[in-house]
Each structure stands twice: as C-alpha cells, then as structure tokens.
Amino acid sequence: MIETDRALSRLIGLVVVVATVVLVGAVSLMSNQDLDNSRAFSMAFLALLIAVSSLTSVRVRVRSTIVGNSWTDVAAFIAVALLPGPFAIIVIFAGVLAAKLIERAAPRKVAFGVAKDTVIGAITAAVLLTLSAGPIEDFRDLIPYFIAYVSGRVADDVISIPIVALATRTSINEIFFANLDIRWVFNLIHFAIAALALWVLQWESKLIVAIAPLALSLHLTHQARLRSRAERQAWQQLAEATDAFNAVQMDAVLRTAVSKGSKLFSADQVEVETWVGDGQLLIRGNSKAIAYLGEPDRKGYDPLTTAIVPLIADSDGSRIGELRLRFRSPVKLSEREQFTLRAFAGALCTAIRNAASFNQLELLADKHEHDAMHDPLTGLPNRRLLAAEGASALDNRDGQGVPALLLLDLNHFKDINDALGHSAGDQVLVAIARRLSAAAGPDALVTRLGGDEFAVLYRDLPAPALAMHRSAALLAVLREPVEVDGMPLTVSACAGVATAPTIGGFVELLRRADIAMYQAKRTNRPVTAYEPESDTADRTGLTVAGMLPRAVAEKEFTLEFQPIVNLLDGKPIAAEALARWQHPDRGKVDPRSFLEPIERSGLLTAFTDAVLDQALDGAKQWRAAGSMWPVAVNISPRSLLDRRLPLLVSARLSDHGLTGEDLILEITEAQTISQLDIVDKVIAELRELGCMLALDDFGTGFSSLSVLPRMPMIQEIKIDRSFVAEMEHTPKAAAVVRSTVELARGLDMLIVAEGVERESQRRMLWELGCTAGQGHLFAKPMSLAKILRMPAFLSEPLHEPGSVVQMPTQRRPGRSGRTGRVSDSSA
C-alpha cells in the first residue's frame, strides 16, 4: 500500500511538472502579445464559464475516491477555439483553480485537477494550431475541431485512468471500461454543444443564451442515465451476492460476503465479524483477496471511514455479528447504497445462521457416524468399521502387500466379571485396548468386536509369514499385569491369524481367522495360523452360487466337444458339447459344482441360451469344413417347463443358418416331469422344429424302461457309462446293455454307449448290437479349434473290409448313428 501511494504521488508530480512547464511557456508567450480590454473581458468571462462548468459535474464514487464527469471540457474547448493558445491555457488554469478552491478540495486533488486540465488545454490548442482550424462555415470545417477535441479526451483518459486506478486500488481495465459507452456518447454530445456554441458566437451571438438550457438538459439526462445504470448494476450485484450465499459452509459464506460486498459497495475493505457458536471469527479483505481470517483484533473504527451494520437474527433479535465497509478516506453512502447495504446485511445474516445450523448438523452427523463405527467403551473401531476397512484393503491390493487379520479372545475374562464386577471388567478392556493400539503400529487397525474379542487388521504386510510374527509380538504386550483398583490382574489371550483369501472377500477372511482362533483355544496355544485342513465347513456350493450371476453376465462359460463315433470303423458321426467354466481366480471349476446351482437359480434360461449359441456356432463351423454331423445340447428337465424354449431354440438355429436336424436335445430324469401336459407341448414343438430328442443316462435314476411308453417322442437312448464299465465283469450289466439294445431296435430308436475306454469294451458293445459310442478310447473332450482339425477316423476298424456282414438295422433316413449332448460328463 505504501508503494502504491508513492507511485500515485510520482504520477501526480509528473503531471504537475508538465503543467508547470506548459504554464510558464504560456505566460512567456503571452507577455509578447498585447492584452486589450476586450480580450481581457473575454478571458475573464471564459474563466468564469470554466469554473461554473467544473462545478457542474456528475460524480461517481469509486471506493473512497470521487470521480467527477463535468462540463469543463466544453468550456475549455471554447476557450481554446476563441483565444490564442497561451491566453487559453491561462484561462483554463485560472477557471479550474477557482472551481477547486470553491469545492475546498484536498491540496493533492487541486494540484492534479488543475495540472491535468492545463495539460489537456495545451494539447488541444496545439492540435488546433497544427490543423489550422478556421471559421465554421460547413460541416467540413468541423473536422479540425473534432480531431482536437478527441485528442483532448484521449489525453484525459491517458492521464486520469492510471491515477484513478492507483488511488482506488483497481485495475486500469476496470476503470477504462466502466461506463465507457455513456462516457463517449456524452463526449460526442459535449463536442456538438461546443461546436454549436462556436457557430452561434460566430454567426448569431444572440442565440448563445439558448445553449445554457440545452446544456443543462443534457447534463440532467447524463446524470439520470448514470444513476439508472448504477442502480441496475447494484441490484444485479446484490442478486448475485444473495445467490452466492446459498453455500452451506461458513467459510464460503464469509468469503462471499467480503468479495461481493467489496465490489457491490466499492469499498476498499470489507470486514465480517461473527459471534455464533462457541467462538468468534473475523474475516477481512476485498474482491481480490482475503487479508485476514482469525480472531477479532478488537480495534476501534473511524465512523467517517467505516460503515457498520449489525447482523441481527430475525428470530430473537440477537446480534450475531457485524458487517463493516472500510474506506481510506471519509465517504458518505447515498440513500440507495444504504438501502442496498441493509438488504445485503439481511441476506448475509440469514446465510450465516443457515451455515451455523448446517455446521451443527454436520457435527451431529459426524458424531453419529463416529459412534456407529466405534466401540463406546474403548473408543476403538467396531465390527462395522473393520468390515469396511477390510473390504477396502482386499479390493485395493496392488499385488505387492498381503492383508492379514488377527482375531483375539481374552481367556477367563468371565471370571473377572464374576469376581470383581463388570466395572472392573470394563477397566481391563480399556487397558487392553490401549496396549493393543500402542503396540500394533500405524499400519494396523485395532478394533473391538464385542465382549472380550478384539481384531487387528494388517492392511499391507510385505510377506504372509510376517502375520504370525507380528501377532506373537502383539500378544506379548498382554503379559504385563493390568492393575484394577490397586489389584494386579494377569490377562492372557488366544488368537487366530489368516491372510487374504483368493476368493470370498473379507467375510471369508474373518471366518478363517475365527477358525484359527478356536483352533488355538483347542490346542492351548497363544496364536495359530489358519490351516485349510482345520476348516471343515463346506462352502464351495455357496461360493460358486454367489459367483454364477457374474459368470453368466461375463460369458465365462465355454464349450468342449467330444466326438461320438461309429463303433465299426471309428468315424465321427456326431459331437457331444460339454460345458466348462474357466474362473479368472479359481481356474477350471468342476461342472458338478455349477450345473446344479444353475438349475436351481433364475439363470437357467440365460445359461441354456449361451450354451445353445456356442454349440450351434461350432456345428456351423465344422459343417463349413465338410463335416455334416450334428451337435447335441443337454437340456435340463426344468427347461422343459418353459414355454419359451422352442422359440429360443428356433431363434438360435436361425441365427446360425441351421435346421432342427443339426441339433440333438438330450434330457435326463424324464419321469419327474413326463406326466405334465406342458412338457408334452414343449417337446412336440421341438420335434416340429426337426430337433432329435435323446434320453440320457438310460438305466439309472428316473431314466428307465418305464419312461419310454410315456415319452413316445424320444428317438435315441444313451447307455450310462456305469453299465459300460461293468458289463465285462458283471453278467447283469451285460444283460442290461443287451436288453437296452434290443429295446431300442424294437422301438426304432438309436442307441449310443457312453464311457468307452478300452478296445475290449468297444468289441463287446458291437457284438451286443450297439453301433455307436463315445469315450477316451476315441477322443477326449477338446476345443472347437481341435475338433475342426480332427482326422476322419478316430480308430482302426474292428474288422478288415469284407470279413464281416453287418445285419441291417432300422434307421430313419438321415439319422443313422447321430447323437450328442451338453452335460457334466468328464469323459
């Protein structure tokens, strides 16, 4: 601020020096010219006109500085146009000086005002002299005068704007663009009045009396427009300020009050002091920056340079603070400014009360949140916060550190409560909590789960082995006796440690730590690490079921295909598709663990659709490669209860450009649903599509002989692998196979054997009349890419060509030997 005042003084001094040089030069030149009575009278009259014009001004306050827009330029321009340059400069000097003395302006303002107008008069006179301005006879004669006048106005801006900017601590751009349009419109009007006065004095001097009313009218118009604009801007800024008070943070409200108030009231500084809550706060600054924020300094204020408005609560009339507008020099606010100030203070008061209420609500909410996450006795985090932090630690693992959890239970704590009372037990718990918190380290979260159970979460251990090491060191701090009412009590504990599981999240981590803790109690050891061998809980089904929705949505299920071959020559005649699940964390999941949960869930339709899509895509590709055999898809009995199944199958066949003859649908456990009418309708619609239906795992469970009469739509029977495995050693198994083959021939059905593993099984099946089979003897399940590269024959023929005559069997056209399925088989 001191440096700014010095710069202001230097600029004013520069203008005064230039004006002094100009004035000395004018006096010197004037002494060489005659001064008659007529010219002296003209000079006196023009000096008086300049003084009156200077006193007639429109004043605008910029902070503590009053900036006036007067008619001095018109009177001075007339003087320059009518008098020789030196005489005009003396007249301007005298007239402006007289006006400033009458106003009783400050010495620095007198010096600057007189010097500025003297320099501008000299510049205007020089331009007129240079352009050789003459009598005004038409509009072209006005050009030199217009150029001279504009030169003076530009010189006025160049001199005045930096001075005003420094005096008001505002930017030059802000001063220059403030009312720029109105200022230059009236500059043009001023020039028109001056030109009109010169023309009247030149041609009709009696009409000069009409100039004064015209000038007065324009002056009042100018004043009204500036006032109207100022009021409009003030209300706009007030509206913006009150809108900005919508903030609910006290700091934001106070900062808004300072910045908006400084701009709205053109104050050098704005202070807001609040007395809400437990303390008092003072903020001081302007539209550019906050100068102070802290406790009130309790210093006095000059009423001439400070406007103070109390902030009064509407509810009880109590004062909650003060709003102060501070100026560097005495300022009297206008009536409009005083009204605006009261409105601004009222809005600020409401905003402060709202912010204080919001702050109280925040504190109350923080307290409730803290209480909900912490144990009221020990102050430690509770189970809820532990679960949140534990889940976060597991989710944000970067692959470097290992999260671990220690679960700790005090031994014989009930004896302390029973012998000494719950108060003594509470003291023990508080002491244990403090010891654990001090010894656990900054990277660990110590929590109380309830009762005498504590937990310690290690968020990021460098290695899993450190979990046991740090847990043992933590338990060591409990060896020192705990003193309760002067009585030393020895406290021990058992603890279990578990590191982050591959799957299952924090719930699984907590469960494992709990299992380890009870293992420590059973073995009477201080601390035990989790061992899978000690975990007898069967959670696989639950875990897999929980992962199924994401697996179906992310299309993690794929298919492998196992060829079905002609037992005579080993040539593939169909392919069975086998569902596989490659989990991103667990790896390959056993089909037996996910097929049953899928059937029980609402995901069966989406799963069936995905399998059909992949299976038919495979069939399309091997048909394009020249292999015209079909693919089979296992259909859950529950799917036969879905009337939408035929539409789904039809849509997928159409998507891949295939017909029903390219698809075999296998069903199992048919007796449980075969008596339902809806099943007959669904199967009938599937047959209308041309799909072949097969009865899987025949001879086991419900897929038995009694099913066939009630399911006439079945076209194929598959002998279960269990009979194939035993038929060489058990006559009963061989008899089942033989009778199944004969039954299938009698009912005009196809027959396929599953699980053919040895050449001897193949020969025996052939001898019993079975013509098709599948199993590891021919090929293991393989990917689609491998089945497309599969050879035309998967085994040597049973007999040399021509050495055996095969008896013809009844086959439907185009169906001989074709079969396949989707199942949980691992063949």
Image: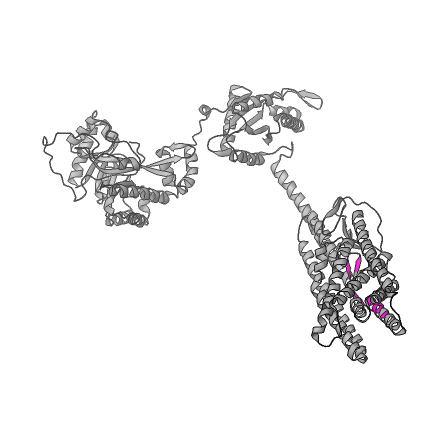
- Give the left or right position of residue 437, taking residue 749 as reference: right
Q: Does the magenta stretch include residue 62?
A: yes
Rendering quarter of residue 779? top left
Vertical placement of 331 versus 433: above or below?
Answer: below
Work out whether residue 534 can be spotted. Answer: yes
Q: Does the magenta stretch include residue 317?
A: no
Rendering quarter of residue 813? top left
- Give the left or right position of residue 389, taking residue 376 as reference: left
Vertical placement of 274 versus 397: above or below?
Answer: below
Badge count: 0
Q: What stretch is highlighted in magenta?
A: 48-66
Q: Give residue 458's position: percent from left, percent from top.
A: 56, 29
Residue that protrudes farthest toward the right in the picture: 37
> Who's the residue at 11% across and 36% down the image?
807
- Give the left or right position of residue 516, taking residue 51 as reference: left
Vertical placement of 645 versus 180: above or below?
Answer: above
Q: Give residue 125's position: percent from left, percent from top.
A: 78, 66
| Residue nearest the viewer, comparing 742 with 195 | 195
Vertical placement of 365 versus 222: above or below?
Answer: above
Q: Give residue 56's position: percent from left, percent from top.
A: 81, 68
Q: Give residue 225's position: percent from left, percent from top.
A: 73, 68
| Residue nearest the viewer, comparing 489 with 34 | 34
